[in-house]
Image (cartoon, coloured by chain):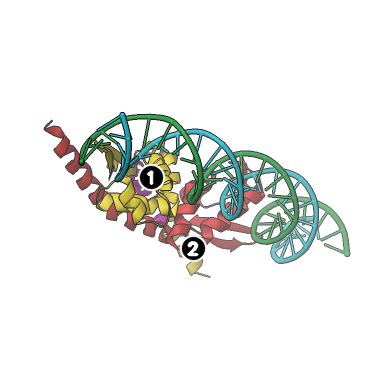
Chain colours: A red, B yellow, C green, D cyan
Amino acid sequence: MEQQAWDALADPTRRQVFELVARTPSHVQLLADRLPVSRPAVSQHLKVLRDAGLVGAKKEGTRQIYFADQRGLAGLRRWMDQFWDEALANYQAEFREGEND
Amino acid sequence: MEQQAWDALADPTRRQVFELVARTPSHVQLLADRLPVSRPAVSQHLKVLRDAGLVGAKKEGTRQIYFADQRGLAGLRRWMDQFWDEALANYQAEFREGEND
DNA sequence: ACCTTCAGTTAGCTATTGCTTACGGTAAGT
DNA sequence: ACTTACCGTAAGCAATAGCTAACTGAAGGT
């Protein structure tokens, strides 16, 4: 469930899709115009992002407005916070030992 | 440069390697023992993590002690903070519009 | 009714990835 | 010097991913 968010955001163009949607909610065609890939590709990316809980959709006539969903990001944020301190601690510990050579 | 960090942490076993190293700095063989992959696989993962700035290494005789490096995480953290607020804002905005139907 | 616009899905191809096995290479123990 | 314990890298393979092109379908506009 958290793995999906990692996979989703690891791909560069898919991350671009998320960034565009996060700044301004928009429909598929608009996203495809601003990206170097075709419309179906954007559709597929949006499906992955939606399954990961990173974006949501809202029907608006024939169009479909996508917007960023914070819940998908929450898992990654927790993970990051968890290892941020540990990483710093061990990093400093290793270098403190190496200082007195 | 930031893409490398995403790619590195997207892979589940590679993320496990990072997590183990972040908790307790250790050498390759020790990591391989705690993971369901071979030692060379761990070596390759560590190379990717090192190129991404996520881990550092320190020679200790014939062994090599790997430890987590906070600098690789910094980029991802900045990215996360950047979109955390925007995602929340747009998420709420979309639902506020949809409430009065 | 017709046509246009918007979107999701499938098939198929190419490129990349993660793995193991096998090899080469360095540092300590005897 | 020889052996043992480490480790990194290359070759090769099976699986996966991202893309385009083509198809299907729903919603408005005329």
Q: Farthest residue toward the left?
A: A100
Q: Position of residue A96 (x, y in %)?
A: 15, 38
The residue positioned 57% from the left and 58% from the top of the image is: A47
Q: Farthest residue toward the bottom?
A: B101
The residue positioned 25% from the left and 53% from the top of the image is: B23
**Same chain check for tags 2 and 1:** yes
Q: Position of residue B65 (x, y in %)?
A: 26, 42
Tell me if residue A75 comes above or below residue B80 in the rendering: below
Q: Is residue A60 visible?
A: yes
As rendered, which of B6 and B88 lies closer to the eye? B6
The secondary structure making up most of the magenta span is helix
Query: Which picture quadrant has residue A62?
Result: bottom right
Frontmost of labels 2 and 1 is 1
N-terminal label among 2 and 1 = 1
Q: Position of residue A3 (x, y in %)?
A: 45, 58
**Label 2 lies in what chain?**
B
Q: Quadrant of the N terminus of chain B?
A: top left
Question: Circles 2 and 1: CB distance less than 8 Å?
Answer: no
The residue positioned 43% from the left and 47% from the top of the image is: B41
Q: Residues within 10 Å of mark 1 (few under 14, many from 20)?
A: few
As rendered, which of B95 and B41 lies closer to the eye? B41
In the figure, is residue C17 to the left or right of D26? left
In the figure, is residue A73 to the left or right of A24? left
In the figure, is residue A36 to the left or right of B45? right
The residue positioned 17% from the left and 43% from the top of the image is: A93
Q: Circle 2 is placed at which residue position?
A: B97
Label 1 amino acid?
Trp
Is residue B34 in the magenta section? no
Give the secondary structure at mark 1: helix
Give the secondary structure at mark 2: helix
Q: Circle 1 is placed at which residue position?
A: B79
Provide the residue span drawn in magenta: B74-89
